[in-house]
Image: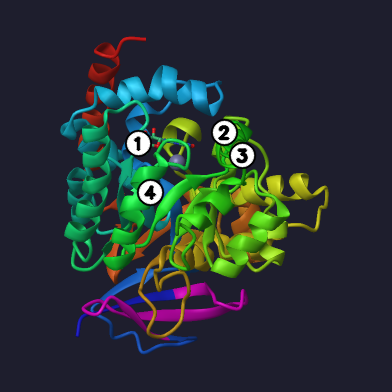
Amino acid sequence: MTTLEITGGAVLRPDATVERADVLVDQDAGTILEIGPDLEGTADETLDAADSLVTPGFVNGHTHVAMTLLRGYADDKPLEAWLREDIWPAEGAMTPEDIRAGAELGLLEMIKGGTTAFADMYFEVPEIVAAVEQTGVRAVLGHGIVTVGKDEGAAHEDAAESLAVAEEFDGAAAGRISTVFAPHSLTTVGASYLEEFVPKARDAGVPIHYHANETEDEVAPIVDEHGVRPLEYAAERGLLGAEDFVAHGVHVDEQEIELLAEAGTSVIHCPASNMKLASGMAPIQRLLEAGVTVGLGTDGAASNNDLSMLDEARDAAMLGKLAASDASAVPAESVVKMLTAGSADALGLESGRIEPGAPADLAVVDLEKPHLVPAHDLVSHLAYAAEAGDVRHTICDGAILMADREVRTLEESRVLERAGERATALSDRTER
Ligand SMILES: CSC[C@H]1O[C@@H](n2cnc3c(O)ncnc32)[C@H](O)[C@@H]1O
Ligand SMILES: [Zn+2]
């Protein structure tokens, strides 16, 4: 057995307590073997975690990783105009090579910020699979379907591709990749395609991930056309399963919250994107009280504009309080749970907790920083004060992806250079 020991740190446990402990990892199995104050010190490899917090790796529950290429490409617009006037035309000009370059850039940023797993909805999924294989992270991938504006044949092909991609890549990257069927949203995919393909996804045992109730503009057409709220419409079409997860859930009423809770469908909260696009404030405290599993996501880098999950945690705490007009709403402990086990549970992953037998997906955060002193409460620091740049080491599936801020699975300078070149060329050939 090949082992790794993370020594000398403070370890965040699943009950949100923090204890001085070492963590022993079975690198062959990719799991945590033991957690204890003074382990033997005979591991094959050691990572120093003195003056550091060892936390579960962060789980980005909703992103579009290749959109790093569009970071800063179009800002200061609401969702509908942003997508139609800027983002969709640019995406229409993207090549598979662009997707690969954007995915590598996004994965570099995520690994440097302590993220060990992410859920993604995009196109050219084989390129994202290849980037995940190379970088060593864990991922839940889906081909995003949009049927509006397409003829019947192209729309049908898009939906069929989403199911085929989910079936082909489930279990790829030595089991680190799982998959979803991914209709973009309830307004951009026609009802007939949902009615045809959702039962097929269920038969294939593939979970479903989609954007839901993100803006008021998305709610109104469903109410007007179908006479029910979006999540009732989703439930009627079999889209609220216990393994399914929706991104956003900003404009949900009390009845829809109850529907989510009863169905066991999870919500991925994307506070930065919701603020930037002025989509609204999700009722996170209410969702938590109703028993809905809530995770955290960055959404794409074009609506955020970074992929830092620690930024997202702070935003979730701040916005949650503002939305509830209550400073005790969405406290630090809830946010840290969303950042780790909440997102992992939503995505059907076993990571997100440091305990024997759990996947060895870990981040080690340097506490010797001015903004992290004094250390009254390390859960508070993780929710409110820590930054992506404080992450020293990132481990996924027992493998070291970054040690002392050096990413081992990507050549950082090459990734930055290639992404910059590809983004410039993409922008030059995209008309606006
Ligand atoms: C068809 S692949 C996914 C699709 O989603 C777009 N997208 C990025 N951010 C958002 C968001 O906040 N709401 C809805 N859609 C979004 C992305 O640009 C791709 O086209
Ligand atoms: Zn999104």
Residue 146 marker: 1
Residue at horizontal 19%, vertical 44%?
Answer: 127
> Which span is picked out in magenta?
8-34
Where does label 3 land, which residue?
223
Sequence-wise, the earlier of marks 1 and 2 is 1
In the rendered image, residue 379, in percent from the top left (x then y), is placed at 63, 65
Q: Is residue 386 above or below residue 105?
A: below
Q: Looking at numbered disc 3 in the image, what kind of residue is underneath it?
A: Val
Is there CB contact under 8 Å for labels 2 and 4? no
Q: Quadrant of residue 251?
A: top right
Of tags 3 and 1, the one toward the viewer is 3
In the rendered image, residue 337, in percent from the top left (x then y), is placed at 58, 66
Colour scheme employed for the rendering of this structure = rainbow
- Label 3 to label 2, Cα distance in Å? 5 Å
Instruction: Give the structural element (helix, strand or loop) at label 2.
Output: helix
Residue 221 marker: 2
Q: As rendered, which of 336 and 170 lies closer to the eye? A: 170
Q: Quadrant of residue 331?
A: bottom right
Residue 53 marker: none
Figure quadrant of the C terminus: top left
Q: Looking at numbered disc 2 in the image, what kind of residue is underneath it?
A: Pro
Instruction: Give the structural element (helix, strand or loop) at label 4.
Output: helix
Visible in this render: residue 409? no
Sequence-wise, the earlier of marks 4 and 3 is 4
User: Is ligand 1 less than 8 Å from the beta carbon at label 4?
Assistant: no
Instruction: Give the structural element (helix, strand or loop) at label 1.
Output: loop
Q: Is residue 252 above or below residue 304?
A: below
Instruction: Give the structural element (helix, strand or loop) at label 3.
Output: helix
Figure quadrant of the N terminus: bottom left
Residue 194 marker: 4
Q: Is residue 280 above or below residue 39?
A: above
Is there CB contact under 8 Å for labels 3 and 2? yes
